[in-house]
Amino acid sequence: MTRKIILFYLVPFVLLFSCSTIIQHVNLEQDKIYAVVPFENYTDTPMAGYTVASILEASLRAKGIKVARTVWTFKDREPSKEELEQLFKEVSHNADYIITGTVNEFRYKTGIDGEPAVSLSVFIYDAKKGTIIKGSSASASGWSHESLGTITQKLIRDIFQ
């Protein structure tokens, strides 16, 4: 009898929390200047790192966060490790913090519906010290009528509340 009661309460609890995402929220200081550097792309989707960085920069500006002038441009290939390090050096003179990260998934799932799926890791660096001071990771998938951009914007809003 006790076993049935435990299962009665445990199963809904497990189902509820197995479908949820826990996100470490990052609060940005309004009086500081942030620079966004393209994310490293660990996906099969070309230019996903540029896409996420562009969406992040626009989202921060829309929230009233001071964002340093963009020093990177889209290229027809992914940036090399050396190019990313050079960008870090360039933006560190004009910003208090540098935001970058990794794109771990950025695709439409295969199947009938083709839902978008995005997974990001975000890191905030102290521009002067070059050390990570904050970080977060988030993943989400959407419905077939949503785009990768929509899901990315939702994740960024969730991370930077």
Image (cartoon, helix red, strand yellow):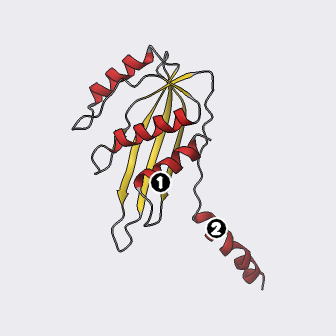
Neighbours of disc 1 within 10 Å: few (<14), some (14-19), many (20+): many
Residue 33 locus on image (x, y percent):
54, 21
Query: Which image quadrant is residue 42 in?
Result: top left
| Marks 2, 1: nearer the viewer | 1
Direction from residue 131 to residue 5 in the image, left or right: right
Nearest to the observer: residue 150 or residue 126: 150
Q: Please, what is the three-letter code of the amino acid marked with disc 2?
A: Leu
Direction from residue 147 to residue 62 in the image, left or right: right
Which residue bears the numbered disc 1? 151
Neighbours of disc 2 within 10 Å: few (<14), some (14-19), many (20+): few
Q: Please, what is the three-letter code of the amino acid marked with disc 1?
A: Ile
Q: Earlier in the sequence, mark 2 or mark 1?
A: 2
**Compared to 25, does 96 lie above or below?**
above
Direction from residue 138 to residue 112 in the image, left or right: left
Identified at 58% across, 21% down, the residue is 32
Query: Which image quadrant is residue 55 in?
Result: top left
Quadrant of the frame with the C terminus: top right
Which residue bears the numbered disc 2? 16
**Compared to 120, does 16 lie above or below?**
below
Nearest to the observer: residue 15 or residue 108: 108
Could you tell me how many numbered marks the image carries?
2
Residue 144 locus on image (x, y percent):
43, 67
Residue 6 locus on image (x, y percent):
74, 76
Residue 1 locus on image (x, y percent):
78, 86
